[in-house]
Amino acid sequence: MAYGDVSAKALLRAMSDDCLRCWRRWVALVLVGILFVFFQVAIISCNPSNLRAKSNQSQWTTTLLSDPKTFNFALNEEFPNVFLFTAEGLTTINAMTRKIEPALAQSWQISDDNKRVTFTLRDNLKWSDGQPLTAEDVVFTYKDIAFNKDIPTSWQDTLKIGKSRAFPEVRQIDQRTVEFILPEPFAPFLFSTTGSPDGVGILPKHVLEKTTKTKDKNGNTQFLSTWGTGTNPRNIVVNGPYLIDRYIPSQRVVFKRNPYYWRQDNQGNRLPYVEQVVWEIIESTDTGVLQFRSGGLDTLTVSPENFSLLKNEQKRGDFTVYNGGPAFSKSFISFNLNTGKRQNGQPVVNSIKSRWFNNVAFRRAVAHAIDRETMLNNVLRGLGELHNSPIDIQSPYYLSPEKGLKVYEYNQEKARKLLLDAGFKYDARKQLVDADGNRVRFTLNTNVENKTRVTMAAQIKGDLARIGIQVDFNPISFNTLVDKLNNTLDWECYLLGFTGSLEPNDGANKWTPEGNSHSFNQQPQRGQEKLIGRKINEWEEEIGRLYIEAAQELDDNKRKEIYAKTQQLTQQYLPEIYLVTPLSLVAVRNRIQNVKFSALGAQGGTLWNKYELKVKE
């Protein structure tokens, strides 16, 4: 039988093919539906607000740009960090009054000669595992960790006293009393006891003592590999308002209320009030803004490029943008001044480029060539201040330009003259070359996650191109950049921001030549091969000496005079070329109550008084 000119067999095949296509379409639609539901569930489950709904707990959510590097406070080198939530010291700083207040210690006494400090701990202190926190833990933290030559903790640089760089003696009087005996008066000592973020945080002897006395197969103390980010959070014992509940790499850190935290309110209720804090890891500032605007975050550090948008949305979004004035951070570029060679004879820095970088006229020319006013207006949208010092603007020890601090104004003609007088010259294409005809060219790194720094670095590339210098801008991950600065030393120039504090001695690890963060002329970390021929400049030695002298001086006005000299030296020799400081801007949902905003301790939207925050659901 035939229908037209199609055979019955062909028709049957066609009908079968049609059925098969229909069946395939049906299966495809079902799969699309399943995938749609799956992704909807995934998106919802990734939303921090959904975590709150599922747990039925009071919660607030904030964000940081990258994964934490360690859960071991003594080994921490980053800010913000988890220890803002989990750790406390003997004392703390009230961010509103800027005074040192009792924390784990309820009181202290200082002898008449200022060489003996006695702390009395609070009664019935406990660790997050319920074990007693006593004077033994304090002595252990200082003697076995902070003063341990086998543990490269930055705490050491803030506790070395005088020219001898001796540590205090520490001894236990009884279960609640600890005495520190100083070799000489030491003005910053109380500040060094303030725990996170700037001082020593007390660590649990009953958990960590064994790790400080045991060596691994490489001869290193096991403490160095203890409490890394791969550790089960249940094994991490803390004394702060929160403990780490769980950590999902590249996603979030979840903190939960420490049931044994010592603080109580006036009615005797244990603090903190909020049961859970979620710290979302969002590697893009733009994505962070989207999360905040959609309700997924409760606090957000506001960048200049997002300020206007968020400021205008305050009422509709039911949040407040707080301004704490100049932030306790400063951005700068720094050249690698290390003249050392590795054991194989290879220089840390290319020898040709090292000659440029170590020529102070070259660094001054670069400082004059950077248009910081334009950077302030275009990159920071005017939401900040020009910065000229390693000390923060809000610190009482900051020396302002009005009081005599040297400033490098934008002047490209002056920059060119400095270079020509130093033996550089221009070729036929107006490219800068050195006396031997080598094209002046270097690599500038910054962390790719920080959009503001990337924009600043791009401007610097353009500014220096106008005086004939080629900048190869290479934004890389923060972790990679930190590894270059601390370990491989394989870098030429970087742009970063460092977090500061009220007390300049907190920067001793940067400004003493043997300091762990003396990055512009870094010595190898412990356990790494030593360098051959690393030289310390006279001005480096002098800055380090002045930091020691300032710590010895108890008269605050005289301390200010000494720190003024250090700031004059850093501006004269420019180991770091300072750029701008942003305002401390944080957006906070109005559902978060008891907010006492201050630029001190506000970085990362973590809010310094987290233990007394409440959430209005």
Image (cartoon, rainbow, N blue to C red):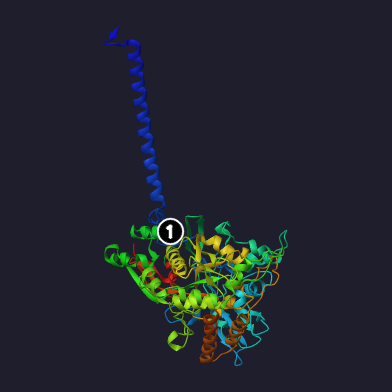
| Residue 458 in picture, x, y percent from top left | 44, 64
Amino acid identity at mark 1: Ser
Residue at the spot x=34%, y=67% of the render?
A: 307
In the picture, residue 459 is in which quadrant? bottom left
Question: Which residue does the image show at 48% across and 84% down from the upper left?
Answer: 406
In the figure, residue 135 lies in which quadrant?
Answer: bottom right
Q: Around disc 1, counting alpha carbons within 10 Å, would you say few (fewer than 14), some (14 to 19), or many (20 or more)?
A: some
Residue at numbered disc 1: 284
Q: Is residue 478 left or right of residue 616?
A: right
The residue nearer to you, when weighing 170 against 128, is: 170
- Residue 110 at least partly seen: yes
**Which quadrant, please, contains the C terminus?**
bottom left
**Vertical placement of 475 versus 360: above or below?**
above
Q: Where's residue 258, x and y in %? A: 50, 65
Q: Is residue 345 left or right of residue 97?
A: right
Q: In this picture, is 349 found above or below 401?
A: above
Front residue of this view, candidates 258 and 160: 160
